[in-house]
């Protein structure tokens, strides 16, 4: 880890999509346990920036480190280990529709190497309790409201005790009061020591739940 305790460190980073510059001269330092909003209009580069953090989009130039991984030199076989330390919350949930809540979470744990059934059951119980969904583990996604599905997605993101959670417009498909509950849950998670970066263009939520805010505009990221 860097001496300054940052778990994300970008210095003069440039990000391209289809050979076009999306963001340039990006300088960010984010410490452990901070809640950060990433704001900006659609197409301003928020999602691209998040995708570089889990090595979905490459860094075109500059220096970039996430969770001790140098993103400019990361090898393909290292990427699963990086992603194991990151929880990702998508706007469109991406739950497996043919499996129950429990089976969705079981699938992730088995895919990341958990084998002991007692430990698996205990961990699933813990993350569901954290999002107040422990009584819904037998339900299928279509039996849940949007807000409940998003809570399950947050539970899924927490399974491997990640040091970093990336949430891309997690309130985008939710009504305002449900969206606020999701944000308040993410703030709780940050207070417990997990860094949370949430892309949003919902200024109302940012005003109601203030936290550090980075803005993407004119191909730059500013505080």
Image: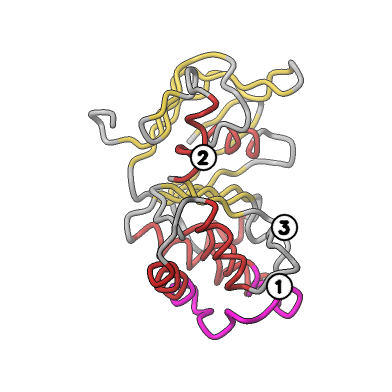
Q: Residue at x 33, y 61 (%)?
A: 192
Q: Which residues are magenta?
A: 127-149
Residue 64 picture quarter: top left
Which mark is on residue 160?
none
Which residue in the protein does label 1 denote? Answer: 141
Count of numbered labels shown in the rendering: 3
Which circle's residue, 2 or 3, is located before the other in the chain? Answer: 3
Q: Is disc 1 surrounded by few (<14), some (14 to 19) or many (20+) residues within 10 Å?
A: many
Q: Residue 13: within the magenta?
A: no
Q: Nearer the viewer, mark 1 or mark 3?
A: 1
Q: CA distance from mark 1 to mark 2?
A: 33 Å
Q: Residue 137: within the magenta?
A: yes
User: In the image shown, does 122 or 215 lie closer to the viewer?
Assistant: 122
Q: Residue at x 62, y 22 (%)?
A: 15
Position of 194 relative to 7 (above/below): below
Which residue in the protein does label 3 denote? Answer: 92
Classify mark 1: helix, strand or loop.
helix
Classify mark 2: helix, strand or loop.
strand
Position of 25 relative to 185 (above/below): above
Q: How is the image coloured?
A: secondary structure
């Amino acid at each position: 880890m860097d001496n300054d305790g940052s778990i994300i460190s970008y210095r003069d980073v440039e990000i391209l999509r289809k050979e076009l510059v999306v963001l340039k001269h990006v300088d960010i330092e984010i410490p452990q346990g901070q809640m950060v909003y990433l704001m900006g209009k659609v197409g301003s580069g928020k999602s691209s920036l998040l995708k570089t953090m889990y090595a979905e989009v490459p860094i075109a130039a500059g220096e970039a480190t996430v969770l001790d991984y140098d993103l400019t030199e990361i090898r393909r076989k290292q990427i699963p280990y990086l992603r194991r330390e990151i929880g990702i919350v998508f706007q469109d949930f991406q739950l497996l529709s043919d499996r129950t809540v429990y089976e969705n979470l079981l699938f992730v744990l088995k895919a990341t190497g958990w084998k002991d059934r007692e430990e698996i059951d205990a961990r699933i119980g813990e993350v569901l309790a954290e999002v107040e969904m422990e009584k819904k583990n037998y339900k299928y996604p279509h039996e849940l409201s949007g807000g409940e599905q998003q809570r399950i997605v947050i539970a899924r993101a927490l399974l491997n005790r990640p040091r970093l959670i990336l949430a891309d417009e997690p309130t985008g498909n939710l009504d305002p009061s449900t969206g606020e509950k999701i944000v308040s849950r993410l703030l709780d998670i940050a207070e417990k020591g997990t860094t949370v970066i949430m892309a949003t263009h919902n200024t109302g939520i940012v005003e109601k739940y203030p936290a550090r805010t980075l803005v993407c505009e004119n191909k730059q990221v500013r505080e």
